[in-house]
Image (cartoon, helix red, strand yellow):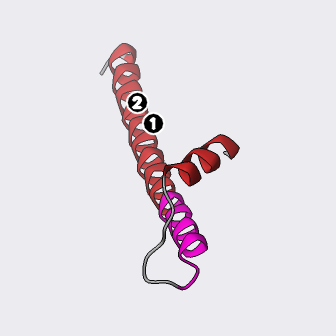
Amino acid sequence: MSSTSKNTELTHRLVSIIEQARSHVVRSVNSAMVQAYWHIGREVVESEQDGQARADYGEALMRSVATAL
């Protein structure tokens, strides 16, 4: 096998390793963001419901929180 063929095969294997790592990172970040959004939602609901079965908040709260963030 020629040196050029070996380098080409090595390059393909290295590219594959990098692509797999990037894919893993994307999945990990997506999972972390879903968890973060769930926790944010839970905090908002618990804050606004104050022990009640249902909260009485509306668009004003969401605008205020969005502006603050």
* Neighbour tally class for label 2: few under 14, some 14-19, many 20 plus, Cα within 10 Å: few
Instruction: Return the x and y of residue 18 as percentages of the image width and height.
Output: 45, 36
- Mark 2 vs 1: CB contact within 8 A: yes
Label for residue 45? none
> Residue, x 30% and y 22% (percent of image)?
1
| Quarter that holds the C terminus | top right
- Secondary structure of the residue carrying numbered label 2: helix
Check disc 1 and report its element: helix, strand or loop.
Answer: helix
The image shows residue 49, relative to residue 41, as above or below, that is below
Front residue of this view, candidates 33 and 3 = 33
Q: Residue 42, position in %: x, y?
A: 51, 70
- Give the labeled residue for mark 2: 15
Residue at 47% in and 64% down? 38
Relative depth, front residue between 69 and 56: 56
| In this picture, residue 11 sits left or right of residue 52 | left
**Disc 1 designates what residue?**
18
Q: Quadrant of residue 4?
A: top left
Q: Main secondary structure of the magenta part?
A: helix
Q: Residue at x 69, y 45 (%)?
A: 68
Does the stretch in magenta take in 49?
yes
Q: Position of residue 36 (x, y in %)?
A: 54, 59
The magenta span reads 36-51
Q: Nearer the viewer, residue 13 or 22?
A: 22
Classify 25 as above or below 50. Answer: above
Type of residue at label 2? Val
Number of other residues with Cα within 10 Å of mark 1, as a class: few under 14, some 14 to 19, many 20 or more: few
Disc 2 versus disc 1: distance between alpha carbons?
5 Å
Residue plotted at (39% across, 43% down): 23
> Where is 2 relative to 56, above or below?
above
* Residue type, label 1: Ile
**Does 39 sit left or right of 8 as displayed?**
right
